[in-house]
Each structure stands twice: as structure tokens, then as C-alpha cells.
Image: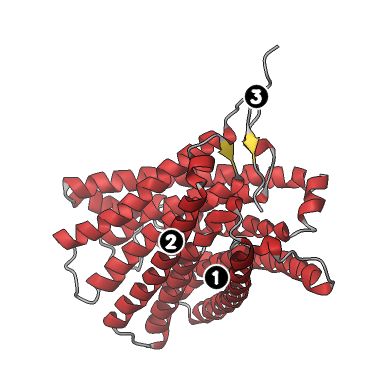
Amino acid sequence: MASQLKRPADSYNPLYFLASLGAGGLSVTFFMYLMFWVPHPDQPVPLFADIARAFQTGTLMLQAAIVIAVLGIAFFAFLNIKTLLWNLSALRQFQMTEGYKTLTSSNAEATLLAAPLAMAMTVNALFIVGMVFVPNLWSVVEYLFPMALLAFSLIGIWALRLMGRYLGRVFGAAGQFSLAGHNSFAQLMPAFALSMVGVGMSAPAAMSHNQMIVIIALLLSTFFAVVAVIYALFAAITAVSAMLQHGTAKEAGPTLMVIVPLMTVLGILSFRQSHGLHTTFGSHGDAADGMMFFARMLSVQLTFLGLGMVVLLRQGYFKDYVFGRQTSPGSYALICPGVALSVMIHFFLNKGLVAAGAVDKFSLTYWAVTALALAAQFAMIALVLRLNRQHFRGQETPQAVPAE
């Protein structure tokens, strides 16, 4: 009698929302091609008309880049939405099981924040899809900004409620939190979710011409950014203490690099706020200051990327969970750092080095730095496809390891 095929994903874990998050992040990496290579003098982001004009008048290389970008955005936005819908359905079913009760009485309850995190990324991805594929979007964009703020506010309230329920439980009575099980950065998931909501709210601050919308966007994005930073600092400091005592939990090892996407999201949030303050309130920033700001953010990212890689290689994580037969939902946390690093390199180069006059746009140095961003992007594409085959295709003898 033939063995029944199963998938590791059949043993559901909320960390599978990171599969949707990673796909959405990859759609953003393709948008970077359009953002920094396609001229868009009339507004801060490229739109359908700008892309069409550049395709008609641009060089063969630019035309090829536009085709790759458009196809990449379409494919990964579709994968983002498809995986999000699967997760929402699976989460509803999971909530009716004993496994859900066990999860919500342990440290792993924080992983539920992956749901609003992925949802916020999807809203950001849909906005990119609108800019790229919908003609004349800018004519109605001022009506879309209040809708975007409302959507992100609802997601933010969802995230705050999940976080409040979790913190109320662990702070409300003794014995509700395991310090020994805090030996990773998995507890930074709420901070990541709140920062993703914040960066979405900061977009109207940078692009709207309605002063009231800009003010609301600035205040709301600031609130979520501040709460995210406070939570991240508290969770990271206590996690380091636990890791020094107990070592890093192997299945949660990729979370050591969650600081990388956190820095990219908060960095873009801050950049958008600065742009909004400049265009609406006349606040002026120096290009050199912008270059050093992105340099500092990138330095923090490289520090934690190096730390994470050292630990993962020492523990043999890639050999077991990426290239081996074992599977862990936490493997999807590997995608976010690579995606975030790619996006940050683009911003550091274009809004930092080029804007300050340190590097000429489209020079040999420019393309050498861009190549680093592209290398990180393509590596994450390969990783997404690899993990999706491991987790979502049937196999006879899966070895699923629950992530903490």
C-alpha cells in the first residue's frame, strides 16, 4: 500500500505567514529597479505613465530591466496574496485545535504577530501594483491615502490587540513566560509587525499634498515606530541574556537577523517622514546627513547579519533545514534579511551616495554597488522557491520541526 503524501505545511505554524511576507518583500526589490532607474520628475514615485515612457524611449538595457521588474512585481505580488489567503484559512482552522491553546499559553504566542505583519506587507505590495499597472492612478491618489491610513490603522489595532493579550498574560501572573525559551530574537516579531504598519502609514506623509493627511500620517507612523523601537530594545536585551545562558535555539536561529529588516523598514519610514516634513513644512535636510543616516542603518544590518550567519553556520542550520531533509517554518525568517539588505543597499546608493555626490549615477562604481543588491535579491528568490518546494509539496517522510 502506497504511503500517503504529506506536506510539512500541514503541521501549521503562524510563522508560515513569513512565506507571504517574503514574497511581498521580493516584489518590493523589483520595484527598486523602477524607483531608481526610471525617471519620474513629476512625483516621488514612478507611475504607469513614467514606466511606459521610459520603455518607449529608453535604452535596450533599461527596457530589459523594466520587463524584468514588471514581471517580478506581478509574480511575487500574486504569490504574496496567494500565500496570505492560504495562511488566513489555515490559521482559522488552527485556532480550533489544541495546538492553538498550547501556543497561546507559551512564548510562541508572539508568533501570531506574523499575521498582521504579512497583512501590512500585502497592503504595501498592492500599492506598488497600483502604481505600476494602473494608468492615471495619481489623479485619484489623494482619495486613496485616507483609505490606506484606515487600512493600516485597522491592521495596527489588530497587532496591538494581539500584543496586548500576550503581554497581559505574561506580565499578569508568574510562570507565564519561559526565560530559558527566550534564547532567540523570536520575541521581536511584534516590533517587526508594528514597524511594518508604521512604514505603510508614512507613505502618505511623503506623497500627499493635503496637509491634514500629512500630519495624520506623520503622527500615526511616529507612534507605531516608537512603540516598535521600545519593544524591540526590551525584547532584544532580555533575549541576549537568555542566549548567553542557554545558547541560541537552533530552530529559531534565523531570528537573530530580524534586526536587518527592522532597520530597513524603520529607515524607509524615517526617510519618508523627512521628505514629508520638507515638502509640507519646509524642513530642510542635508544630502550628506542622508548618506550618513543610511550608512549607519546599513552598518547595524551588517553587524547582525554577520552575527546570525556565524551562529547558523556553527549550528549547521543550513545543512539541516535548508539543504537537508528536516524542515522548520522558521526557515522563512531567512528571506526577510536578504530582501531587506537588497532594498537598503539601493537606498544607501541612490538616496545616500548619489544624492550626496559621492558616486555618479550609472557609473562603474554605481553598478558595482548595485550588483550587491541584485545578488542578495536573486539569492532570496532562489531561497523562496527552495523553501516552497520543501514545505508545500507532498513528501512521504516529512520531518517537521515546530519553530519556537
Q: CA distance from mark 3 to mark 2?
A: 36 Å
Task: Give whichever of 134, 271 is nearer the camera.
Answer: 271
Q: CA distance from mark 2 to mark 1?
A: 23 Å
Q: Amino acid at mark 1?
A: Gly
In the image, 332: left or right of 235? Answer: left
The residue carrying mark 3 is 5
**In front: label 3 or label 1:** 3
Number of the label disc, if any, that sits on residue 198: 1
- Percent position of residue 121, x then y: 53, 57
The residue carrying mark 2 is 305
Task: Tell me which label, 2 or 1, sits earlier in the chain.
Answer: 1
At label 2, counting other C-alpha atoms closer than 10 Å, the crowd grade (few under 14, some 14-19, many 20 or more) is many
Element class at badge 3: loop
- Percent position of residue 350, x then y: 28, 67
Residue 33 showing in the rendered view: no
At label 1, counting other C-alpha atoms closer than 10 Å, the crowd grade (few under 14, some 14-19, many 20 or more) is many
Q: Are marks 3 and 1 in contact (CB under 8 Å)?
A: no
Q: Quadrant of residue 167?
A: bottom right
Number of numbered markers: 3
At label 3, counting other C-alpha atoms closer than 10 Å, the crowd grade (few under 14, some 14-19, many 20 or more) is few
- Percent position of residue 132, x then y: 39, 52
Q: Which part of the image, by quadrant, shows the C terminus?
A: bottom right
In the image, 175: left or right of 289? Answer: right
Q: Are marks 2 and 1 in contact (CB under 8 Å)?
A: no
Identified at 36% across, 77% down, the residue is 293
Element class at badge 2: helix
Q: Amino acid at mark 3?
A: Leu
Q: Amino acid at mark 2?
A: Leu
Identified at 50% across, 46% down, the residue is 316
Task: Tell me which label, 3 or 1, sits earlier in the chain.
Answer: 3
